[in-house]
C-alpha cells in the first residue's frame, strides 16, 4: 500500500497555474510516475490532461440534476453538481500514453480539477474511471492514485483507490502528499538488448492465430530475461552497490543457456514450423536515488517485454483497422495473391508458406529533465508521427531539433516463420507403416542375396575350367614344338 506520494514541484505548480488562468469548470487527466515497493511510495513526474474526444467534447464536465437548476447566487452555490466523465475515452488515452512511457514510468492514476462538492458527489464515478484506466494501462500494483485539485478553496488532496471488484465510497482512502524535487534525483540506465528467439510451432498451436503464438513466444522470452544476469557499466550487479554519478549507466543482460525442455517439442511429428524473432531493442529506466539497484534491473527487463508487446498490439490494432479493406499486414513468401486477412489475424494452419512480419521500430524524444518518452514507427512513417503524438497525447511541445530525437534502433525487428506444412511430416502411425515397409524391403534384399550365392559359385567354376584348358593348350603346343 502506498503510504506517501511525492510530486515534482515544478510540474505540479505549472499545471496549477495553467488551470488557474484558464479556469475550466472541470478537467481530468493522467498521473505519470512510478510506484516503489521498497519505499511504499509513489513518485509523480507530471500531470497530462486528457484531450477532447473525436467529437471535440471535453473528457469531463459538470452536470446538474434534472429537477434542479443551478443557482445563480454566489452566496448559495449549488451542492448538487456532479461530474460526468467519458470513461472509455480516458481509458483509451491511458492505453496510448502507456505505450510512450519507458522503463519504470507508468500511468499511476488520475487527477481531477473540480470543486469540492462535485468531487464528493462523484466518488463512485471517479473510482470506476480509475479502474478503467488501470485495466487499460496495467501495472503490477493493486491500487491507483486519485489526485484532487480543489479550487474552492484551493488545495491538493491525494487518495488511494483500491482496485477491488466492488466499487464503493470506501474504495478511496487518503494518503500523505507533498511536493518536492523528484526529477533531479533520477538516475538513467540504458540497455541495448540483442536477441535471436527461435521457437518451434507445435501441431497443437496450428489452430491458433499468428498473434496468439507470437504472444506466447514473448512470454517465453520474458522467462529467459527473468533469469538473466546483469552487468552495469561492465560490472556484475551487486544489490548493495550504489550508482550516484549523473552519467548514463550502460546495462547489459547475460541470458542463460537455453534449456532443452523449453522447446516443448517431443518429436518431429509435433512440429509444423519454426518462428524466428530477432533484433535489437533499446530500453531506458529511471531510478530514484533511494531505490535499490535491483529496481533498475527489473524496470529494464520489464520495459523490454512491454516494448515487444506494444509493437505487437500496434500491429494487431492496424490489422483490425485494415481488415475491412482487405489490406495485408506482412507478406507470405512466394505468395503472389494477397490474403484476405492480415497475417496477424490468420490461423497458422492456413499459413502453409513461410511469412515475414516487420515490427515497428522504437524512437525516443526528450521529455522532462533529460527523461525520454518513446513512440513506434512503421516502415512508411517518419519522426513527424512522433511529434504529432507528443503534442496530442502528452500535451508537450514537439521537439524542433531533429538531432534531439534518438533513433537507437537502426533496423526494425525481424519476424519470420518457416512452415513445414508442405513437407509431408509423417504421423505416428505412418512412421510404423514406413518402418514395416523398410523391414520387408530389407528382408527381400537379404533373401535375394542368399538365393544368388549358387549362381555366383557356378560362374567362378566355369572361369577356372576355361583358364585351365587354356594352360593345358599352351603346354601341349610347346611339347609338340
Image (cartoon, rainbow, N blue to C red):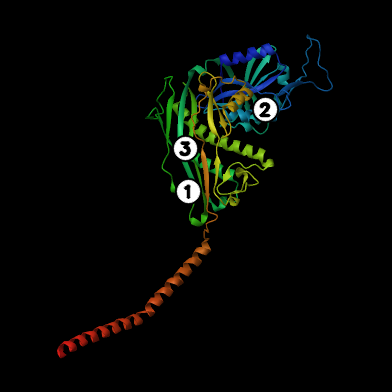
- Local SS, label 3: helix
Q: Considering only vertical position in the picture, is 383 above or below 329?
A: above
Distance CA(mark 2)–CA(mark 1): 41 Å
60 versus 357 height, above or below: above
Q: How many other residues sit within 10 Å of disc 3, few (<14), some (14-19) or many (≥20)?
A: many
Residue 317, picture quadrant:
top right
Which residue position holds label 3?
Answer: 225
Q: Of marks 2 and 1, which one's residue comes earlier in the chain?
A: 2
Label 2: how many Cα within 10 Å (few below 14, some 14–19, many 20+): many
Quarter of the figure with the C terminus: bottom left
Q: What residue is pinned by disc 2?
A: 90
Q: Residue furthest front?
A: 481
Q: Is residue 314 left or right of residue 302?
A: right
Q: Position of residue 446 (x, y in %)?
A: 39, 74
Q: Secondary structure at mark 1?
A: helix
For label 2, the SS is helix
Q: Residue under circle 1?
A: 263
Q: CA distance from mark 3 to mark 2?
A: 33 Å
Q: Is residue 189 visible?
A: yes
Q: Nearer the viewer, residue 206 or 448?
A: 448
Decide which of 257, 196 is in the foreground and name it. Answer: 196
3D distance between C-alphas at marks 3 and 1:
16 Å
Q: Nearer the viewer, residue 320 or 125?
A: 320
Mark closest to the chain's N terminus, 3 or 1: 3
Residue neighbourhood size for the residue with mark 1, other residues' Cα within 10 Å, grouped as few (<14), some (14–19), many (≥20) = some
- Can you give x and y, in whole percent of width and height, for residue 306 in the image? 54, 34
Q: Earlier in the sequence, mark 3 or mark 2?
A: 2
Amino acid at each position: 500500500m502506498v503510504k506517501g506520494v511525492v510530486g515534482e514541484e515544478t510540474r505540479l505548480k505549472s499545471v496549477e497555474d495553467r488551470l488557474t488562468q484558464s479556469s475550466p469548470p472541470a478537467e481530468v487527466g493522467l498521473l505519470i510516475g512510478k510506484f516503489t515497493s521498497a519505499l511504499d511510495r509513489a513518485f509523480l513526474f507530471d500531470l497530462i490532461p486528457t484531450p477532447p474526444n473525436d467529437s471535440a467534447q471535453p473528457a469531463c464536465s459538470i452536470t446538474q440534476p434534472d429537477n434542479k437548476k443551478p443557482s445563480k447566487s454566489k452566496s448559495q452555490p449549488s451542492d448538487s453538481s456532479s461530474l460526468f466523465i467519458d470513461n472509455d475515452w480516458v481509458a483509451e488515452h491511458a492505453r496510448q500514453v502507456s505505450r510512450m512511457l519507458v522503463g519504470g514510468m507508468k500511468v499511476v492514476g488520475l487527477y481531477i480539477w473540480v470543486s469540492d462538492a462535485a468531487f464528493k458527489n462523484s466518488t463512485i464515478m471517479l473510482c470506476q474511471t480509475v479502474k478503467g484506466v488501470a485495466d487499460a494501462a496495467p501495472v503490477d500494483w493493486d491500487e491507483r492514485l486519485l489526485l484532487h485539485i480543489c479550487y474552492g478553496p484551493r488545495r491538493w488532496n491525494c487518495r488511494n483507490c483500491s482496485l477491488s471488484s466492488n466499487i464503493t465510497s470506501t474504495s478511496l482512502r487518503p494518503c500523505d502528499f507533498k511536493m518536492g524535487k523528484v526529477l533531479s534525483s533520477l538516475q538513467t540506465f540504458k540497455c541495448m538488448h540483442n536477441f535471436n528467439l527461435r521457437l518451434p510451432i507445435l501441431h497443437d498451436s496450428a489452430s491458433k492465430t499468428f498473434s496468439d503464438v507470437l504472444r506466447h513466444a514473448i512470454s517465453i522470452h520474458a522467462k529467459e530475461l527473468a533469469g538473466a544476469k546483469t552487468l552495469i557499466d561492465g560490472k556484475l550487479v551487486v544489490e548493495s552497490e550504489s550508482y550516484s554519478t549523473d552519467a548514463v549507466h550502460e546495462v547489459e543482460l547475460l541470458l542463460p543457456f537455453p534449456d532443452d525442455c523449453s522447446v516443448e517439442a517431443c518429436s518431429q511429428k509435433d512440429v509444423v514450423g519454426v518462428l524466428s524473432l530477432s533484433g535489437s531493442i533499446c530500453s531506458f529506466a529511471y531510478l530514484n536515488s533511494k531505490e535499490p539497484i535491483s529496481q533498475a534491473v527489473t524496470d529494464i527487463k520489464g520495459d523490454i517485454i512491454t516494448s515487444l508487446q506494444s509493437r505487437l498490439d500496434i500491429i494487431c490494432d492496424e490489422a483490425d483497422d485494415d481488415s475491412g479493406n482487405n489490406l495485408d499486414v506482412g507478406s507470405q513468401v512466394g505468395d503472389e495473391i494477397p490474403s484476405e486477412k492480415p497475417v496477424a489475424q490468420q490461423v497458422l494452419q492456413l499459413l502453409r508458406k513461410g511469412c515475414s512480419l516487420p515490427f515497428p521500430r522504437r524512437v525516443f524524444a526528450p521529455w522532462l529533465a533529460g527523461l525520454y518518452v518513446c513512440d513506434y514507427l512503421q516502415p512508411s512513417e517518419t519522426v513527424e508521427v512522433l511529434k504529432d503524438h507528443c503534442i496530442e497525447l502528452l500535451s508537450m511541445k514537439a521537439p524542433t531539433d531533429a538531432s534531439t530525437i534518438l533513433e537507437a534502433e537502426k533496423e526494425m525487428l525481424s519476424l519470420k516463420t518457416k512452415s513445414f506444412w508442405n513437407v509431408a511430416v509423417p504421423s505416428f502411425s505412418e512412421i510404423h507403416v514406413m518402418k514395416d515397409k523398410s523391414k520387408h524391403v530389407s528382408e527381400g534384399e537379404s533373401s535375394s542375396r542368399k538365393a544368388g550365392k549358387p549362381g555366383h559359385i557356378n560362374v567362378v567354376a566355369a572361369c577356372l575350367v576355361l583358364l585351365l584348358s587354356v594352360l593345358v593348350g599352351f603346354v601341349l603346343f610347346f611339347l609338340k614344338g
